[in-house]
Every structure is written in structure tokens, then in C-alpha cells.
Image: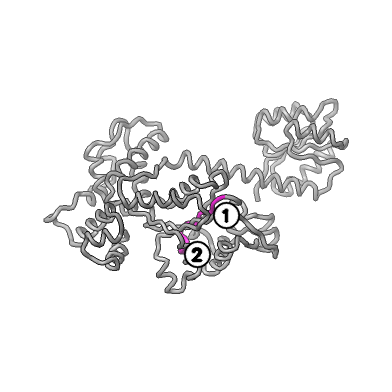
Amino acid sequence: MFHLNVLIVDDEPNIRKTLTVFMESRGHQVKAVSCSRDALAEGELQVFDLAFVDVRLGSENGLDLVQSLLAANPWTKVVVITAYASIDTAIEAMKRGAVDYIPKPFTPDQLELVTERLATVCSMEQRIVSLQENLNRSNPEENLTSRYPSMQRAIALARQVADSDAVILLRGPSGTGKNLFARSIHHWSRRSEKPFSVISCPSLRDDLLERELFGYTKGSFPGAVRDNPGKVSLCEGGTLFLDEIGTLPLAIQPKLLRFIQDREYERAGEQETRKADVRIIAATNSELETAVREGRFREDLYYRLNGIQIELPPLGGRADDVEQLAGTMLKFFAAQNHKILDGFADNAMLALKSYMWPGNIRELRNVIERAVILSKAGLVSEEHLPSNIFTKAQPVRLGDPLTLDVIEETHIRRVLASAKSLQDAADILGIDQATLWRKRKQYKI
């Protein structure tokens, strides 16, 4: 339940007490005052999510207070209450910025309805702000550009299908930027002004995952003290990204399949069939074909998801992309940590470009953030990089004291990064596509 910080402004003690008891019984924090002066004083000390303001505060006009409260904090939702209900008063209250209007005497049901609706609005606003802050402050802007054909093909296909309503399946090793691709596809689409939301399928239990997706009603299970619309409803008109779809429990798969086919679903605890216009993008780093053969993933759902498949290549072997990404990340983390850094020393950049990056972009991000934290000023040098970058970063040359597996993996990665297609890579390597597929699985490429 979303807990509100509530301000009550009424000159009648009984009204203040009634509202206070009601709000506190629902878990909200309450401050009750009797006049405009005290209300404004409280408004300077803390931010209120919701304010109940009486139209007549003794000799004062409560409608004047509405404007003053909103001037101090535009996010506050003001509900006007009065014993002198009239259409003119309601219109004037809305003009001053109030979001609702209830007459005295009001009932608990009226209060419940108003409070729950505004709590939902406040919760959604905070989620949006939190998401925007996370996007702006927690991650560098990784532009989807590349000099390598495999990555260029993925970007071109993503742009081509972005404005359709087709389900998209992003495939590739962990850390290759599937979340970034999904966000970019949403941004390039006609849905870009609508919500984008993410569900990490492995992060929730079966029952919690279903409730997170489709929502639930109050009382549908122990602890369900209020309705939850679910991510599908909150993403109306937008895009829902299902990360690591291969771990989706079998019990939920038929419900997701039905939603993809018919755009219909039910919330837990109710029989009403709902509809939603939501575009689905899924991602996986696992072999869904194997999961289908083993009975862990429905074949019909697999074919629904696999209509448009975008393969994201690993970062290893894409030295120029590593250099571009590292530079972008360095600027971001330097600004975040209030440091002035001029770039990378030659030996440090050589190590970054030579390393095979088994953790892909996610690993590179962590390495650059660590280097920025350890650096003081000037250039990032070898001493700021983890030791494993050097032990595994030396360029592979024929005759080096290396195992055949290391040489083979390095060669396959570099050929895949530069080849125009999987068939082209197989031809260069002198093997068939089936053998190349097995090698990619063996080396987790």
C-alpha cells in the first residue's frame, strides 16, 4: 500500500479528528491544523502528498490557501471540503488547482474512494520520477552505434521493426545490452510517449510474478489490502519488457500467450475480463529451443515470441566499440563522482580493447566505474584496472603459450564480430552452421 503524507486544514476540531483517525487507520501520516498560517508553516517544513482544505476557515477563505499550498509544492493533491456545497464553489476550487471536491457531511466510502484514487496517482508519479532519475543518473547514455556488421544488422533491424506492434525477441549473452535495445525500440516507436516498464522474470516467485503482470484485487489473497492494477494495465498504450523470458514459470505461460494473442487477461481475485493495448518485447540469454524440447517452455508461446528475433553479438572482438563505449562511460562516471579525467593511457586502452569481455557491456561498465573511483585526475592507467584484464587481455598470436581452446574461442569471436552473417562466419571458419552453433554454445558467445 502506498502511504501518503496528509495535511488536514479545518477549523472544526471534530472534522480534524475524524479525518485524522480515518487516515491514520489506513497507514497514512497526518498533520492537522486549524488555519492557513499553520498550514503554510507546515508546508515549509515538509512535503505533503495530499491536503484536505476547508473552504471556510473562520474568517479566511480556504480557496486562497489552495493556491498558496500549490505554489510551495505543485505535486500536492488538494481536496476541497465544505458544508456550503455549490457548483460555483466546485468550479472555483478546480480553477485554483484543487483535484477534487467533497461536501460535508462526507461518508467513509467517499473518503476511501478519493484517497485510494489519489494514492494511485501519487504512486504512479513517484515511479515515473524514480525511473527518470535512474535513467539519467545511474547509467551512461550508451548510443546504439557500431562499426561491426553483426551489431549494425541488429541495430538496423531494431529500427525497422520499432514502429510495428509485433512481438520482438532479443537474444544474446548476458550483459550485451538487451535492456538498452528494448528501451531504444520503445523510444523509436509511435508508443514513445506512453509508459515503458520492465519485469525481470527470474526475480519473483510464480504467484508474485503473475500478480505483478496482471494485477490483483483487494482481498484476493492475504495481505492484499488494496487493488493493484498490474504492469499490463499501467503500460496501457506503451511497451512491456519481459527480461529473461526463458525462466517464465509454466503456470503463467498460457496466460501470457493468451494476452499476446487476444490482448485479454484477468486480475487475480476477479472474473472480469480486461483488455490492454501493450506491446511486448522479450529477452533471453538461454536456448529456448532446448527448453521447448525439454518441456520447460510452451512451443506455441515460443513461436509467438519468436516472430521477430534480434540477435545481439558479444562485445569481445569489437575493439572499436569497446573504445567508444569506454569513453562514454568514463565521461559519465567522472561527472557522477565529481572528477576531471582526460581519458585513458595508451596501455590501459590497449588492455581494454584486447580483453574478450565475457561479461560484455555490463562487465565493461563495472570496470570503468571502478577505474574512475580509483583515479584522482589525468588519465586512467593500468593500475586503475582489475588484474584479470591483463592476464586475459594479451593479443592472441600463433606460437603464444596458449591452449587451443583459447586460440579457437578468440578467433571465432573475432570472425563473428566482423562477418556479415552466421553463414559468412561459418564459411570463413571452414565449418558448417551447426558446428558454429555448437562452438558458440560451448564458449557462450
The answer to if 258 sits in the magenta stretch is no
What sort of colour scheme is used for the picture?
A: one colour
Give me the C-alpha separation between circle 2 and circle 1: 15 Å
From the viewer's perspective, tell me whether residue 386 is left or right of residue 182.
Answer: left
The reply to whether residue 161 is visible in this rendering is: yes
Residue 238 placement (x, y as % from top left): 56, 50
Res 402 quadrant in image: bottom left
SS of the residue at dot 1?
A: loop
> Image point 27% across, 67% down: which residue?
435
In this orientation, which residue lies closer to the viewer: 417 or 246? 417
> Image point 21% across, 40% down: which residue?
347
Res 100 quadrant in image: top right
Question: Which range of residues does the magenta coloring cover?
Answer: 238-247
Kindly identify which numbered label has been placed on residue 304: 2
In this rendering, is residue 153 above or below 335? Answer: below
Kindly identify which numbered label has been placed on residue 391: none
SS of the residue at dot 2?
A: helix
Question: Looking at the image, which residue sits at the far left?
Answer: 399
Residue 197 placement (x, y as % from top left): 54, 50
> Label 2 sits on what residue type?
Arg
> Label 1 sits on what residue type?
Val
Residue 169 placement (x, y as % from top left): 45, 58
Kindly identify which numbered label has been placed on residue 278: 1
Q: What quarter of the picture does the C terminus occupy?
A: bottom left
In this orientation, which residue lies closer to the viewer: 253 or 335? 253
